[in-house]
Image: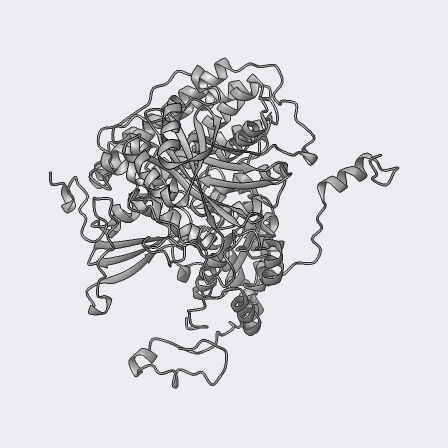
Amino acid sequence: MKLPFGRTTSSPISTGHSASLDFAQPEPVDLASGKYVKLWQGPQHPGITGNMSLELTLDGDTIIDCKTHVGYLHRGFEKLMERRSFIQNFTVVCRIAVPEPTFNEYLYSHAVEEISGIEIPERATWLRTMNLEMMRLASFLMWIGGQGGAFGQYTVANWTLAYRDYVLDLFEEMTGARIYHMYIVPGGVRAGLPDGFEKRAREIMDGTEKLLDQIERVMYNNTVFKARAKGLAVITPEMIDPYGIVGPNARACGVERDLRKDEPYLAYEHLDFDVITGSDSDAYERAYLRLQETRQCVSLIRQCLDNAPTDGPFQADMPNVLHWKVPAGETYVKAECTRGEYGYYMVTDGTEFVRRVHVRGPSYTHAIAVMERLAVGNNIADIAGMMVSLHTYPPEIER
Amino acid sequence: MKNSLNTEDTLENSGLTEEEQLLFSNARPRAYEPYPIKAVEDFANWARANSLWILAFGTGCGAIELRPLMTARFDANRFGVAGRPTPRQSSVFIIGGYASVKTLKRIIRSYEQMQGPKFVICLGICPINGGMYFDSYNTINQFDQYIPVDLYATGCMPRPEALVASIMALQKKIKAGECDGANRYVENFDWYKANQKKVIKNWDMPDYNW
Amino acid sequence: MNDLMERLQRDFGVDDITVRKPALTTFRVKKDSAETLIRELRDREGYTHLNFMTCIDYIEDGIFTLVYMLHNYDKKHSLGVHVDISRENEDMVSIHTLWAQAWTYQRELREMYGINFPGSPRLEEDFCLEGWDDIPPMRREFDTKEFSEQRFGHREGRHSEEPRDHMKVELYPNRGGDEK
C-alpha cells in the first residue's frame, strides 16, 4: 500500500541489514563521489531524545546508513557500584535512567531483598506500586509531549510538560523530591503518605483524564500527525525476538507480553487491568497505544489509592546497614517500565560490596540495533519522530 | 593538519592545498572590548542580560529540569530566555551536571562556536568536585579547568525555581559587568587548551578555527 | 524443568545447576559446547529471548564468567548460562548470528573487558569510551579512583567521611568512637 511521501507499509531495506539473522555488513559507499552526505544528528541537537548521536549517510533526503553513537553519558555505574556498600548504592542507582528513575530504585532494592531473603510489609508493596505507576504516568506525559514536538505539535508538548509538574508535585509530597526520589529502599519505602494526599491525587487524576481526551482530539486526530506517523518505522512481528524488542514497541505488533500480567510483582495481581495491544506497529499505532496505557495508568493509580492499607509498617526490620553483608547469591529481577522490560542482574559474594550488577535497559537494543535498521530508507525529516516513537532514553544504554 | 600551539605549525606549511587552506583559519580567538563610554556599556549589558538565549544541549542529568522551566508554570520566557538550536545564536551554555570526557569534547566545540560575550552556568555539584562520580574513570572532576564558568547552581537536579534564581543572579552579574568568561578564555587560552588536551586523548579537531 | 536439566546434563555436560527462584535457574557449561547449547535452547526449547549478555570478573580464580540470560515467554522461565573463559586474551565464540541484537553486547564486552568475539560485526568501534588508552576499565585490576585522581585532579576542600567510623564517633563520643 502506497502512503504519501513515498513510504510503503513495509520498511524498505537498501543496504546491509537484511531480514535474515545473518548480519550482513552494509556495502561501503563512496563518500568521495560527492553523491552522499554524511551528517551527524546530535549530540547537540533538539531532535534527539537525550544525549546521543546518529551518524547518518544521506543520498539526497534519503538515509542509506545509520550508526548510533552512545557513550556521552557513560559514568561507569557498574564499576562504581562495586566500590560502594549496599546502602550507598541505592542513592546512586536512580541516576542510571534519568527521565524515569524510580524503576532503578525498585529493582535494586528487590534484587537485594531477594538475595538476602527480606520480606517487605504489605503497605510497602502498595506504596511502591503507586510510586511506580505515578512515575510511569509522568514519563508517559513527557513522552507524549516529545512525540508531538518531534512532528511539530509544540502545543501538546507544552501542555503535557506543564501538567506533568502536578504529578511531580505529588511526588514531592510523597517522597520529598521531584525527580530523584530515593524513596524505595531495600526493606520497604521511606515514609507513608502525608495527610490530604489522596484528595489531591484524585483531583490530579481527574485533570489528567481530561487532558488526555483533549490531546487525543488535538494530536491524534490531526491530519499532519497522521500523515507523518502512519507507516513510519514499522516493526514486524518477526523482528521482535531476534532484536529483543520489548514493551509497547512489541505490544503494538499484537504480541501480548506485559510483565505486570505475565510475571506479576508487587501488588499487580490485585489490580484489575488488561494488556493493551495494537495491530500493526508503526509510529502512529505505538503512539496511540501509549496514550491508552497512560489512561490505564490513571486507573491503576486510582485503584492503588482505593486499596492501599493506610496503617501498618512501611519498612521491614533491616540489619545494621553500615555492616550489612548480603549472603552470596545471584538473581535477575525485572519490571515493566514505560519502555518495556527493565532488568537488574546482581551477583553477590557474601562481602559488604556487591560483586557485579548489570543493568538491562530496554533502550539498549531499541536505540542501536533496531534504530539502525529502521532508519534506512527513510526521509531525514522523520528521524526525530522515529527515534521518539521507539521511546529510547540514552542514559540506560551506556549507564 | 597538526594541532598544536606551536607557531611553526602554520596553515602554509601544513600540506593542504590553497582551496583547503581557505576552509581554516589559524587566528587565535580575540577578546571583545567593552564600549569606551560607560553608559553605552551599561546599556549593552542590560540588553545582554535581558535576552539570554540558551543553547539546546542536554549534556547530562540537568536537562530534565530545563523542560519544565520553559513551561507556563515557571516561564523562563518572561526573562527573555529562549532555547536556541545552534551555538551561533545563543549566549548561555547550561552544563547540566556531570560532563563525561566524550561530552566535554563536544561542549568545547560548541562553546567555541558561540560568539562572545557568552556565559556558562553549571548545575549541581558534579562540575565542582566530581560529585557522586568523583571516582569515575569517565567523568571530569573540575569543570572550570576546561571552560570558564560564571555561575554554579546547586541541587541534584536544581529545581526550576533554583534555575530561575540562577538566571536572575546571572542577570545581576552581567549588569554589573562582571561576566567576562569569554575574555578569560581568550587570555588563558593556552592553559585551557593544555588542560583539555590532557583529558581528551583523541584530539582530532583544530585548535581554534571558528 | 527437571527433565530439561537432565537432558542438558546428559547431552552437554552442564554442571553447577542452581535453582535461584522458581522462574530462574542458572548452570555452567563448558566453553566448547556453549554455542551449541544456546542454539539448541533457542531453537528447540523455546528460549527465544536474549535478556542480556554480560561478564563477571573472578580475578582471584583467573577467569571471566560470561553470563547469557535466556527467557522463554511461554513457560515464563529464565535460564542463566555461565561460561568460563580465561582472563588472558581468550576468544569466545560469537552468537551474533543467533540474535540480531547480540553484536552490541559483544562490542561492549570487548571494550569493557577485552574479550574478543571473532566474526562479530563492528567489534573494533568504540562503544562508550573515546580515546581510551588504558586497560579495559571493568577489569578488577583497574583502579578507577586512582585513575580519576590522576587524570582529572582533585579539588581541595572536599571532605569525605567513612560512614562506619563517623557513626562510631557519633554513637560513642565519650569513648572516642570505640565500640566496646
Question: Looking at the image, is B21 positioned above or below residue A72?
Answer: below
Q: Is residue A323 left or right of residue A47?
A: right
Q: Residue at x 46, y 58 (%)?
A: B102
Q: Quadrant where the N terminus of chain B lies? A: bottom left
Q: Position of residue C150 (x, y in %)?
A: 61, 62
Closer-to-camera residue (C136/B11): C136
Q: Say how many tags the image has.
A: 0
Q: Position of residue C64 (x, y in %)?
A: 49, 48
Q: Position of residue B45 (x, y in %)?
A: 53, 61
Q: Quadrant of residue A370?
A: top left
> Farthest right residue?
C174
Q: Is residue A253 left or right of residue C19?
A: left
Q: Quadrant where the C terminus of chain B lies? A: bottom left
Question: Looking at the image, is B42 positioned above or below residue A198?
Answer: below
Question: Looking at the image, is A16 positioned above or below residue C173?
Answer: below
Q: Residue at x 58, y 44 (%)?
A: A82
Q: Residue at x 51, y 71 (%)?
A: B32
Closer-to-camera residue (B39/C21): C21
Q: Position of residue A139 (x, y in %)?
A: 42, 34
Closer-to-camera residue (A53/B171): A53
Question: Looking at the image, is A148 positioned above or below residue A270?
Answer: below
Residue C54: tell me if it is visible. Answer: yes
> Farthest front residue?
C10
Q: Is residue A253 left or right of residue B144?
A: left
